[in-house]
Amino acid sequence: MTSPDYKKSNVRVKEAFEITCLIYFAAPYSQSQKVTLPEEMVLSLHEHVNKQGELWYEASPVDSSAWAPLLLDDMHRFDKKFRGDYCFHPEAEEIERYFETIPTVPKEILPQLKSYHALQGCLFGTAVGDAIGLPYEGLSPRRIRKLKVFPLKHRFFFGRGMLSDDTEHTCMVADSLIYSQAESEKFSKLLACTMRLWFLGLPAGIGMATLRSCVKLWLFIPANKSGVFSAGNGPAMRSAIVGVYASDNETLRRELITINTRITHTDPKAIKGAMIVAELAARNTEGNSLNPDNCLAALSTIIDDDRELEALVTKAINSARVKQSAEEFCAQENQVKGVSGYIYHTLPVVIQIVLRHNQNYEEAISEAIRCGGDTDTVAAIIGGIVGANVGKKGIPEDWLENLRDWPRDKTYLHLLGEELTAVKYLKKKGRAQWMDFVRLLLRNAFFMIWVLAHGFRRLLPPY
């Protein structure tokens, strides 16, 4: 049975019915369970055909009134009883009988729906961009061209992708938002605690500023004094999720970004860069995307009197306006060996690509990789921003399918997005899956082996 009307659509349940679903819980396990879908529940359906040719539907609830009793009550979140993401294999007559497409989402549901899809898109967009870009980190554009990596696919571990610190930091920020309900003081303390535990897992590729800050946190220096004077990319790579979560509250967004940045980086340039990333993501969430004509004015309050930043943003806008490729733009800006880890080198490239490819996730990530240098971080930042605009469904399916990691796997990412939406709209204290350092140690040991393997591979041609 083929049902093109339901490939990517919003539907309403016409009458309550029971169906057997595949329920995901603590990664990587799942179980089959009968679930009753209530009448009038609004779902976002995404059609899949599995390897056996069977039609399956990935369904996500978009109506918060249905979340409360079915998905997000205190007994069901992050345990084995029920998950927000579920798949079912209905008969043709069940589709016709129980579902009806709705051309527009009811106004009372629209804000939740926008946040839900933007949060999912931001989390998965960050993760996929990070994993796609990771094998090319530190390579020049010339070497990347010689390796003939396009069209892109996961190449970190036998056609599979794994996550680096870019995604891990985004997840830590999401966890802290969930538990703190975005209350500033709690958010600061929880993020500091989460970073301490993350550091115990001996993460690979940690930046020097972040490393020094984590050491200071373990010396129990307060989070507002643990940062070091640096303008690296660290804060920017974990800021898009804040922009999406606080898209409708500029004051809260800036407050959270300042806390999120200063815990590791105190240079004002790092704060401004992180704020611009969050602003781009927030605009995408609210459906008010920037373009070359309104970008500079929209960012003016963040840029303030920083003439260097204003000049860099202006160059990026002018480059995007004439549709110059990102690689050409980098060469023009004397970054022929690739984008560095300095925020004022990275930010113009991010803006230039987002202004040109805000509707096309695949092309945006491809442009980021072609620039070389800090490819995983640049692709993660762009992925989070563009992902907030196109949603999870705008990410190439094979890139999603072959994203593999543990314990922060795809189910975990999906649940973070769902829980963030619930915390924001249901005003309940949230939960997240516990990440103990023993599991992180095991995962990071395996990850480090493959990072070293890629390092040795780079000693071989083509040069």
Image (tube, rainbow, N blue to C red):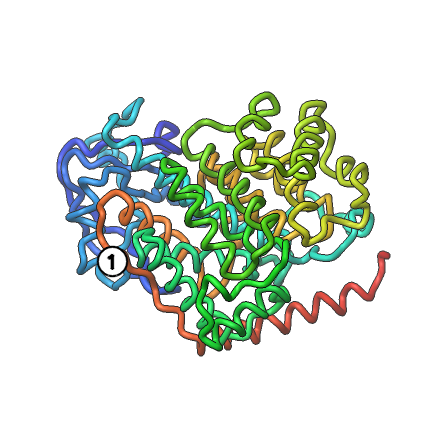
Work out whether 189 lies above or below 102: below
* Quarter holding residue 229: bottom right
| Residue drawn at 24 percent across, 35 percent down | 42
User: Quick check: 328 left or right of 240?
Assistant: right
> Which percent across, then down, holds residue 267?
60, 54
Work out whether 402 lies above or below 189: above
Q: Amino acid at mark 1?
A: Arg
In front here: 116 or 207?
207
> Which percent across, then down, holds residue 382?
58, 43
| Residue drawn at 39 percent across, 33 percent down | 8
Quadrant that contains the N terminus: top left
* Quarter holding residue 83: bottom left
Quadrant that contains the C terminus: bottom right
Work out whether 105 lies above or below 203: above
| Residue drawn at 20 percent across, 34 percent down | 13
> Which percent across, then down, holds residue 113?
32, 36
In front here: 164 or 161?
164
User: Quick check: 243 left or right of 107?
Assistant: right
Q: Number of marks in the image?
A: 1
> Which percent across, then down, holds residue 122?
46, 44
Residue occupied by mark 1: 77
Work out whether 158 lies above or below 246: below
Whether residue 53 is visible here, answered yes or no, is: no
Q: Residue furthest front?
A: 305
Mark 1, Cα crowd under 10 Å, few <14 / some 14-19 / many 20+, is many
| Residue drawn at 13 percent across, 39 percent down | 16
Whether residue 410 is visible here, answered yes or no, is: yes
Badge 1 element: loop
User: Quick check: 346 left or right of 419?
Assistant: right
